[in-house]
Amino acid sequence: MNEKKDLTVRESTIFVLEQSAEGFEVLKDSMLVAATAFEQDNNTTAIEIINEKVTPCLADLCRFCGTLQVYYHDVLGEKTVLKLTEKLKKIEQNMNEIISALEDENFIDSADILRYDFSNSLDDLATIFPLIKETFEQSNREDLDKFAQLF
């Protein structure tokens, strides 16, 4: 039987950051499967993968990063927030590009964006997560040691 363990805000954030490498790989794998489907003219399958797997993962990632930027700006520090913002802008640019390509039914460009552009942007974003983890580990902010309220 699994015993439920309550985590503090610090512990839960560090846990998510530690698990992020696996999450990035799952997201990139889903993007590659969708890109391959586009290249094989299985456009309906590709769009289903984007809607069911890619979009929810990207939404969760952006929500997590947005929470860090807004609520933990002081923990991260100005330099780290600026780096995170810069990396998220690339993700946003990729999202706008894929939306435009899909609206134009340009599925080859859609495949390229998924396979190359998004992959590079996600790899770039992943590089800052160890630094964010370190800032949470070292922060003296007292409310980080209160129990997180998970929904």
Image (cartoon, grey):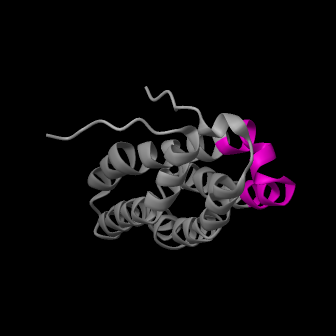
Residue placed most toward the observer, 75 or 30: 75
Q: How many marks?
A: 0
Left or right: residue 106 versus residue 88 is left
Position of residue 104 measured from the top left corner of the image (x, y, whole percent): 53, 51
The answer to whether residue 47 is above or below residue 70 is below
Quarter in which the C terminus is drawn: top left
Residue placed at 35% from the left, 60% from the top? 30
Left or right: residue 4 versus residue 127 is left
Residue placed at 70% from the left, 61% from the top? 87
- Residue 102 magenta: no
Q: Residue furthest right?
A: 78
> Which secondary structure dominates the residues rendered in magenta?
helix
Position of residue 62 measured from the top left corner of the image (x, y, whole percent): 58, 45
Left or right: residue 145 versus residue 78 is left
Residue placed most toward the observer, 90 or 72: 72
* Residue 133 falls in image quadrant: bottom right
Q: Which residues are magenta?
A: 68-86
The answer to whether residue 81 is above or below residue 24 is above
Position of residue 18 measured from the top left corner of the image (x, y, whole percent): 48, 61
Residue placed at 75% from the left, 48% from the top? 75
Residue placed most toward the observer, 10 or 112: 10
Residue placed most toward the observer, 102 or 11: 11
Quarter in which the N terminus is drawn: top left
Q: Residue furthest left?
A: 1
Left or right: residue 109 versus residue 125 is left
Position of residue 112 measured from the top left corner of the image (x, y, whole percent): 49, 70
- Residue 82 magenta: yes
